[in-house]
Image (cartoon, helix red, strand yellow):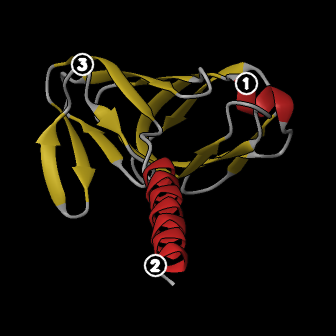
Amino acid sequence: MKTIITMMAAAFAALTAVASINACADELPAGMIKSAKGSAAIERAGARKPAQAGAALMASDRVVTGADGSVGITLRDETLLAVGPNSNVWLEKYAFDPTSHEGKLDATVKKGTLGVISGKLSKQSPGAVQFRTPTSILGVRGTEFVIDVKDGE
């Protein structure tokens, strides 16, 4: 009986450890701020903090820049994002499997400019990367481009 209880306790501990690892995997940053200049902030869960080099960027974060602000971002799949002045960019969804290079990237440019050099995700999973503006949706299949959203467009 004592052996069965010990085995059950060990199995429970192993399952708890696996669940903990999976929870941490779900909370991995989407990427990292590589550079930030001027007025730039990350908005997360209703809080706003300055964007600084080395800061983690999570799925569902917004990057907001002022007239003198810009932010360089590298996502986990090596996608490069350059957020220009007076911009509001929302990383709606981000998932990336480093083994298969599959996942999803959905982002919205509410206003301002965003330069993009696509990474592994768009090359492996055509159609898995989308950028939205107030008036359009851009599906990405591996390329470099700039989105410029003027006020009211």
Instruction: Mark 3: give few (<14), some (14-19) or many (20+) Cα within 10 Å.
Output: some
Q: Residue at x 36, y 50 (%)?
A: 61
Name the spot of residue 84 as percent of width and height, x first: 36, 25
- Closer to us: mark 3 or mark 2? 2
* N-term mark: 3 or 2: 2
- Quarter of the figure with residue 52: top left
- Quarter of the figure with residue 103: top right
Where disc 3 sits, the SS reads loop
- Closer to us: mark 2 or mark 1? 2
Q: Residue at x 24, y 50 (%)?
A: 43
* N-term mark: 2 or 1: 2
Name the spot of residue 42 as percent of width and height, x first: 24, 42
Residue 2: which disc?
2
Residue 53: which disc?
3
Image position of 134 with respect to 34: above or below: below
Would residue 98 appear left or right of 83 to someone viewing this image? right
Which amino acid does the dot numbered 1 rest on? Lys
Q: Which residue is mark 1?
A: 120
Is there CB contact under 8 Å for labels 1 and 3? no
